[in-house]
Amino acid sequence: MKLTVSHRIVTRFDPPRRRLLQSLRLYPTACASQKVLTWNVAVSEGVMGADFTDGVGDRTVTVSIPGETGEVVLTITGEVQTFDTLGVLRDLKEKISPVAYLTSTRLIRADGAVAQLAREALAGIDKTKALDRAHALANAVTGALTRTREHPAEMLTAAEVLAEGKGDQTAFAHVLIAAAHAAEMPARFVYGYFHKNAAELDVETRDSGALVTAPWSAHAWAEIWIEGMGWVGFDAVEECCPDEAYIRLCSGRDGLDAAPVRGVAMGMGAETCQVALDVTGAEQ
């Protein structure tokens, strides 16, 4: 399938900020499931700096606006040819051991309720059948949560999401990762695009001067390490493994660690973001 992406994020600062420096991980992963046909990332008034691929295969580009700015417009456009690899992440040049993704964070720490969800989901499934266990965990998360369209100002922890019984795609991924960790299975968070993604979002926040991440409003899912297969994606919201309808961008331990847009600036005050996103697809 050929997917076409049009994504625009407008961030306004009141009062204006100075010396804005951002790190962008907005480039499709080099792997077997996708081939970039065209891709462009542009930042208004931005000066592109370092460009490198990190140890997990994510391309990172830094951008700076040395003077004062009251508005930053980030535009991502492109076309990607995608292929169905049954959710298996193949041909990724990665240097990090999957064991590193057994490490918990505040957002994906499993409490008693998450651990209980994992135990009930895996009851009766042989520990040697890792793929079956991963599917069972994803199905359990799907059954435990109701999807909401709201995007909270701050990400909730997996325990908080499960207690509320609802959340967006980020929340689903956090609960699934926490459940996998409870079952001693390496798991991580993935950001990307999904066919038919469309969003218009207005968000206003106040901070102390650190610009952590712009509202993303695209898609998120989890990957679980299966011995003998590698990383396999699980989208508990869509109840499937990622196929040709997905574009993978970047990964991390949780939604903050994987943030595609993050950075710092001098100054503090209100930050308002407007997001417009459209992902369309055409069969080949």
Image: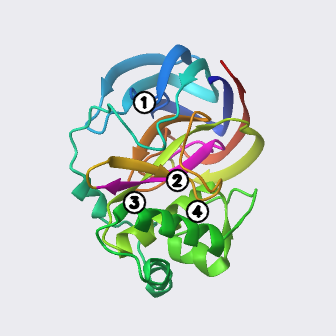
Position of residue 177 relative to residue 59, above or below, is below
Query: Which of the image's four quarters has the N terminus?
Result: top right
Is 102 placed left or right of 269 in the picture? left
Q: Nearer the viewer, residue 30 or 262?
A: 30
Is 43 placed left or right of 168 in the picture? left
Mark 4 or 2, closer to the camera? 4
The residue at which mark 3 appears reads as: 131
Is 272 placed left or right of 132 in the picture? right
Q: Which badge, 4 or 2, comes first in the chain's sequence?
A: 4
Determine contact: label 1, label 3, CB under 8 Å: no
Is 61 placed left or right of 72 in the picture? left
Label 3 neighbourhood size at 10 Å, few (<14), some (14-19), many (20+)? some
Q: Which badge, 3 or 4, comes first in the chain's sequence?
A: 3
Q: Quarter of the image holding residue 219?
A: top right
Q: Is residue 97 magenta?
A: no
Place of residue 188 in the rendered image (x, y in percent of width and height, measured from the top left): 40, 54
Q: CA–CA distance between discs 1 and 3?
A: 23 Å
Q: Which badge, 2 or 1, comes first in the chain's sequence?
A: 1
Q: CA–CA distance between discs 4 and 2?
A: 29 Å
Place of residue 95 in the rendered image (x, y in percent of width and height, measured from the top left): 20, 39
Label 4 neighbourhood size at 10 Å, few (<14), some (14-19), many (20+)? many
The residue at which mark 1 appears reads as: 29
Mark 2 or 1, closer to the camera? 1
Q: CA–CA distance between discs 2 and 3?
A: 44 Å
The residue at which mark 2 appears reads as: 208
Mark 2 or 3, closer to the camera? 3
